[in-house]
Amino acid sequence: MGFALQKDIFISFFRAGMLGYGGGPATIPLVHKEVVDTYGWLSDEEFSDILAIGNSLPGPIMTKMAGYIGYRIGGYVGLTTALAATVLPTVLIMIALISVLINYRDSPVVQGMTNAIAPVVGVMLFMLAYNFLRRSQGDLGWPVVIGLSVVSLIAFELIGLHPAILIAALIIYALVKKSPSSKAKEGDAS
């Protein structure tokens, strides 16, 4: 576990982080290329298992995979090296972009860019919420989905309930309430 191994760990994850434009899913093939094909640290089966475990845990997939793979091949130092190499490209790019935006924040071009981004993000969030509602409709039915949406909106906007409390309450509701599809499955099994 010498310097050469740590250097290879750093280079492989830095390269994947730097070239993986688009976030976690875009970096997975790059990490595979590095750890399976280039360095041979893992087999395809081992990589698939790590990917499956990483997908089942909350948080960004790239950092979870980097931490586990780094630890597996280089111990605690490898874990730290892989995580640093994974996060460093994003940090450097963000520092560069923020410094440029701060220096030119009064520029009409930068103000136009930031003003143009807001509606796009709003539409993306709306589409995400709509897709969640549509998927929920299949499990709960429209009346329950609309009712929970209205109650959530009132609790969040009018009452000022903290989002974590609202999410916890909805999770408890989902655990207690059986969906129509699970009731149908139970009826079929009887």
Image: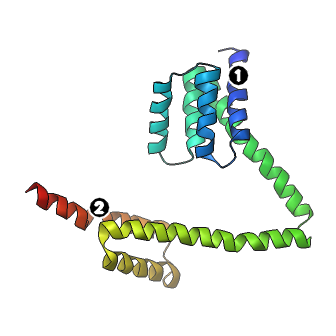
Q: Residue at x 83, y 73 (%)?
A: 112
Q: Is residue 91 above or below residue 12?
A: below
Disc 2 on helix, strand or loop?
helix
Q: Quadrant of residue 113?
A: bottom right
Say left or right for 169 vs 43. Answer: left
Q: Residue at x 57, y 26 (%)?
A: 71
- State the CA–CA distance, disc 1 to disc 2: 46 Å
Q: Residue 178: in sight, yes or no?
A: no
Q: Residue 172: in sight, yes or no?
A: yes
Disc 1 on helix, strand or loop?
helix
Q: Residue 146: horizontal and vertical position, in percent?
A: 38, 79
Q: Nearer the viewer, residue 39 or 84?
A: 39
Q: Residues within 10 Å of mark 1 (few under 14, many from 20)?
A: some
Instruction: Check disc 2 and give the amino acid type.
Output: Leu
Q: Residue 74: horizontal and vertical position, in percent?
A: 61, 21
Q: Residue 116: horizontal and vertical position, in percent?
A: 76, 72
- Observer-side mark, 1 or 2, equals 1
**Sequence-first tag of 1 and 2:** 1
Q: Residue at x 60, y 34 (%)?
A: 66
Q: Residues within 10 Å of mark 2 (few under 14, many from 20)?
A: few
Rendered image: mark on residue 80? none
Q: Residue at x 65, y 31 (%)?
A: 82
Q: Nearer the viewer, residue 20 or 59?
A: 20
Question: Residue lying farthest bottom?
Answer: 158
Instruction: Check disc 1 and give the amino acid type.
Output: Asp
Q: Residue 48: horizontal and vertical position, in percent?
A: 47, 32
Location of mark 2 (residue)? 175
Location of mark 1 (residue)? 8
Q: Is residue 140 above or below residue 154?
A: above
